[in-house]
Amino acid sequence: MKKIHIYILCFFLITSITKAQSTKDYNDFQAWYSASLKLDLTHNWSITGKYRLRYNQDASNFQGSYLFGEIDKRISNSFEIQSSYRLAMVDKGTYHRYALGIEAQKEIGRFKFAIRPMVQYQQQYFVDDDEQSDTDAFLRTRFYGKYKLTRRFDVYAFTEPFVELDNSLAFDRFRNSAGFKYEVRKGFKVNLYYLWQPDYSHKQLRTNHVAGLDLEFTLKPWKKKKRGNYSE
């Protein structure tokens, strides 16, 4: 447990340093805190629920709450179908997001590589009376790599461009992240990461710098227990 306390302390130090370096013009530092529970079911199905809090404006303003639900189905050792829903209740309104994609994976020694094309549809209901609602659709393709340093410790990075699915097919944003996961005990991991996201959807470029902390829990409720060998 001492190790995990050190990792969390490092996270808050990074948060303080990045906050001091950020500017309020077109760059914003944010802090994201999440907790998730994944249920590994039979026949290669899994269900995941997540709750996230976001703080923006140099991590000084509570932006809102996010609820995630995901259902995945592994169809082979290399491919997995993923579907997800996200409800965002933020200061600017309410967002409903639906997504469907497929991920291809490959492991080489301690390395794992994955590519995941995903189609996302989003409905936005704004608080502002001038614009009541809006809808958007995106193709987001994530390129992911992970390296297992030790049995409990992984480092990873990914990049994910968002392309708006309209007549222009323009890049909406890029999501880039690097971090590490530490397995505190079986079924519980701590994920610390940094995310850099330039946003091109506005007249002027907006860039978010995010320090994130995720607590990830996994349960296998229907896993059969191995019987022990007993001798009289």
Image (spheres, rainbow, N blue to C red):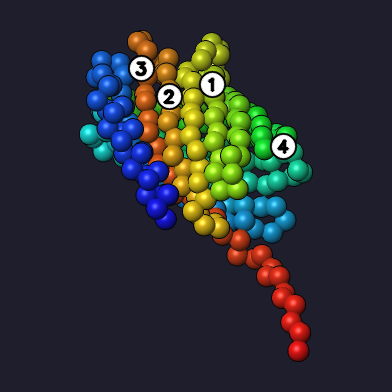
For the residues labelled 1 and 3, the Cα–Cα distance comes to: 15 Å
Q: Which amino acid does label 3 sit on?
A: Arg
Viewer-nearest of discs 4 and 1? 4
How many callouts does the rendering have? 4
Residue 203 percent coordinates (x, y): 36, 10
Mark closer to the chain start, 2 or 4: 4
80, 231: nearer the viewer: 231
- Name the secondary structure under disc 1: strand
Q: Do the residues labelled 4 and 1 touch (CB within 8 Å)?
A: no
Q: Is residue 52 visible?
A: no
**Residue furthest to the bottom:** 232
Is residue 87 shown above or below 158? below
- Name the secondary structure under disc 4: loop
Mark closer to the chain start, 1 or 2: 1
Is residue 225 shown above or below 177? below
Residue named by callout 4: 109
Viewer-nearest of discs 1 and 2? 2
Residue named by callout 2: 196
Residue named by callout 1: 161
| Res 163 quadrant in image | top right
Residue named by callout 3: 206
Q: Which amino acid does label 4 sit on?
A: Gly
Report crowding for label 3: few under 14, some 14 to 19, many 20 or more residues within 10 A (C-alpha): some
The disc at residue 93 is: none
* Residue plotted at (60% across, 65% down): 221
| Res 6 quadrant in image | top left
Q: Are marks 2 and 4 in contact (CB under 8 Å)?
A: no
Residue 172 percent coordinates (x, y): 47, 18
Q: Do the residues labelled 3 and 4 touch (CB within 8 Å)?
A: no
Viewer-nearest of discs 2 and 3? 2
Q: What residue type is labelled 1?
A: Pro
Residue 230 percent coordinates (x, y): 74, 82
